[in-house]
Amino acid sequence: MSIKSFNPNRIRNKFPILNKKINNNQLVYFDNAATTQKPIQVIESINKYYSEYNANIHRGIHTLAEKATQEYEKTRKTVSKFINSRSEKEVIFTRGTTEGINLIASSFVKNFIKKGDEIIISEMEHHSNIVPWQMICEENEIILKTINVFENGEIDLDNFKELISNKTKFLSIVHTSNTLGTVNPIKEMIEICKKNNIITMIDGAQASAHSKIDVQDLNCDFFVLSAHKMYGPTGVGIVYGKEEILEKMPPYMGGGEMIKDVNFKKTTYNELPYKFEAGTPNIGDVIGFNEALSFINNIGLDNISLYEKELKNYASNSFNEIEGINIIGNSKNKIGIFSFTVDKIHYYDLGLLLDSKGIAIRTGHHCTQPLMDKFNLEGTARVSLAIYNTKNEIDYFVEKLKQLIN
């Protein structure tokens, strides 16, 4: 599909939930940074697994088990190609970005970063990219440093460079902020880290549905993402790690599948990627993730980026016409995520009032409380756009918000 022939209504027809009425109004779903809706092929593929070939994987020789294993591993191949990893061995399935970060903290940082060493994160991180590092730093007496964020929502690169010392061993940074929409200059930051022998981890949860990810071009050591923010099921994510690093790391959890041989004297661990995938995985949803990636690939990430940029600019210009609205963060490089406050209306009230009109937005701190503290806010309302959103929906939102303000 080319951008010239791109028709958002054709896309919308693939999402059954978008036909839903909320309080007798057509649903306008603007909470995509929290989770995206699912196209019909994702829903049908999960149903097909449970109704036609439900079986455990990697362990059986019967027809159902072999079919389930084949479809499960097909997703790994698709993910590997999607992020351009060198090998499928570098793709580990998890329950999502949060588990992926915790896996890296527990398996890599705990074992390879020592007392007195330093980890760097930023002020715009999601709690999932703060709390695991706080926990591991407290346990191992590691020092945690944070990069300053400017008032416009951009990261302070000079401050980042100043924070680096000969004790700095690890950077964990968000690719795209779930609150500000800011797209960070991660490639430049990774290059700086490489010159200083610093291991890098990228939180790609908000980026992966909006722009191409090439882990080899980025040269990051780890990359994590979640399927449910990419039109896929909940409870599925991946950790990408460079093979030579993953080989050195001990397993995150013990149990079935991650073993090669077990006796009461010694357990030998499985090869990559299976040594990090203990127990029965979320088979049906991993299979559904493959269909979500196919959905994205069929549209084309270049087309998605172009359309969403057009939508973001339209929304930005429209929001500027609303008297009393305050947009938080206005970086030059951002996606269609708008956190905002409205004069004299609490953000929770705003969310409820808009819901009465069929408009679903997010309200609160968006799991970025330190960032809210930075801007002296308790919370905000947030609009986040996706490929199935339209200019007509933005017009409707603006109209209803103006009425509420009046």
Image (tube, rainbow, N blue to C red):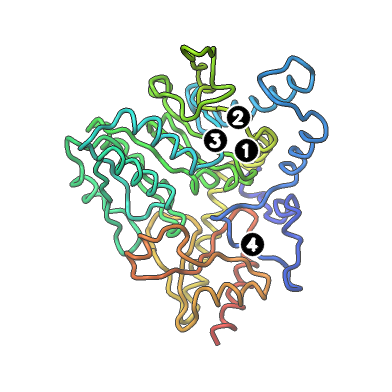
Q: Mark 2 — residue?
A: 78
- Going from N to C along the chain, the mark reached first, 2 or 1, is 2
Q: Mark 3 — residue?
A: 94
Residues at marks 1 and 4, CA–CA distance in whole angstroms? 21 Å
Q: Mark 1 — residue?
A: 293
- 108, above or below 6, in the image: above
Counting from the top left corner in percent of width and height, residue 351 is at 57, 72
Residue type highlighted by circle 1: Leu
Helix, strand or loop status at disc 3: strand
Residue occupying the point 64% across, 24% down: 73
Helix, strand or loop status at disc 1: helix
Counting from the top left corner in percent of width and height, residue 142 is at 25, 40
Q: Mark 4 — residue?
A: 29
Counting from the top left corner in percent of width and height, residue 396 is at 64, 73
Residue type highlighted by circle 4: Tyr
- Work out whether residue 350 or residue 194 is closer to the camera in this orientation and state it: 350
Locate the N terminus by quadrant: top right
Residues at marks 3 and 4, CA–CA distance in whole angstroms? 27 Å
- Work out whether residue 309 or residue 174 is closer to the camera in this orientation and state it: 174
Pair 3/1: label in front: 3
Residues at marks 3 and 1, CA–CA distance in whole angstroms? 16 Å
> Is 116 displayed left or right of 127 in the figure?
left
Q: How many residues crowd mark 1 within 10 Å: few (<14), some (14–19), many (20+)?
A: many
Are discs 2 and 1 less than 8 Å apart at CB? Answer: yes
Are discs 3 and 1 less than 8 Å apart at CB? Answer: no
Kindly indicate the quadrant of the structure image that contains residue 379.
bottom left
- Going from N to C along the chain, the mark reached first, 4 or 2, is 4
Q: How many residues crowd mark 3 within 10 Å: few (<14), some (14–19), many (20+)?
A: many
Residue occupying the point 29% across, 35% down: 191
Q: How many residues crowd mark 2 within 10 Å: few (<14), some (14–19), many (20+)?
A: some
- Going from N to C along the chain, the mark reached first, 1 or 4, is 4
